Image (cartoon, rainbow, N blue to C red):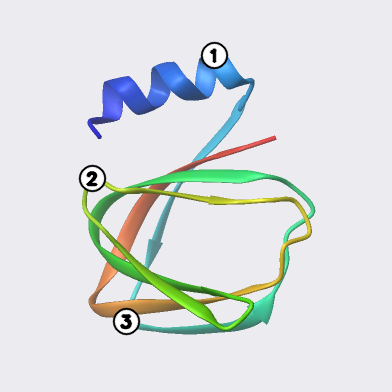
Amino acid sequence: MDKETFLDELDHDGFTQRVVVTRAAGLLPDHAHPFEARALILSGDIEIVVDGQRRTYRTGEVFRLAAGQRHEERYGADGVQYLVGRR
């Protein structure tokens, strides 16, 4: 997905808070957020682990997490940068 289309979807769906996140290669252990998140990968890759299920997202792909959803994040060798909308 391209950035313009993603931003249009965030607007349409009420994701008013937006942040660009940059992470170096590494791991963020199991945790949860008090907000729903929808993120577009701008560069690099991220593996999200939810309920033991692993999925890798690469540039141009979108991941979604429900508010309170426990998950683990693993950032690829080149790290990751993503644009996230929160609500």
Residue under numbered circle 2: 60
Q: Which residue is mark 1?
A: 12
Mark 2 crowd level (few <14, some 14–19, many ≥20, 10 Å Cα): some
The residue depicted at 41 percent of the width and 16 percent of the height is: 8
Disc 3 to disc 1, C-alpha distance:
32 Å
Mark 3 and mark 1 in contact? Answer it, CB < 8 Å.
Answer: no
> Compared with residue 52, is residue 62 higher up or lower down, i.e. above or below?
above
Q: Earlier in the sequence, mark 1 or mark 2?
A: 1
For badge 3, the amino acid type reads Ala
Secondary element at image label 1:
helix
Q: Residue at x 66, y 82 (%)?
A: 30
- In the image, residue 36 sits, relative to residue 65, either above or below, namely above
The front one of 28 and 66 is 66
Q: As shown in the figure, which amino acid type bears the numbered disc 2?
A: Gly
Residue assigned mark 3: 25
| Image-based side of 41 in relation to 39, left or right | left
Q: Give left or right: position of 47 versus 18.
A: left
Which image quadrant for residue 29?
bottom right
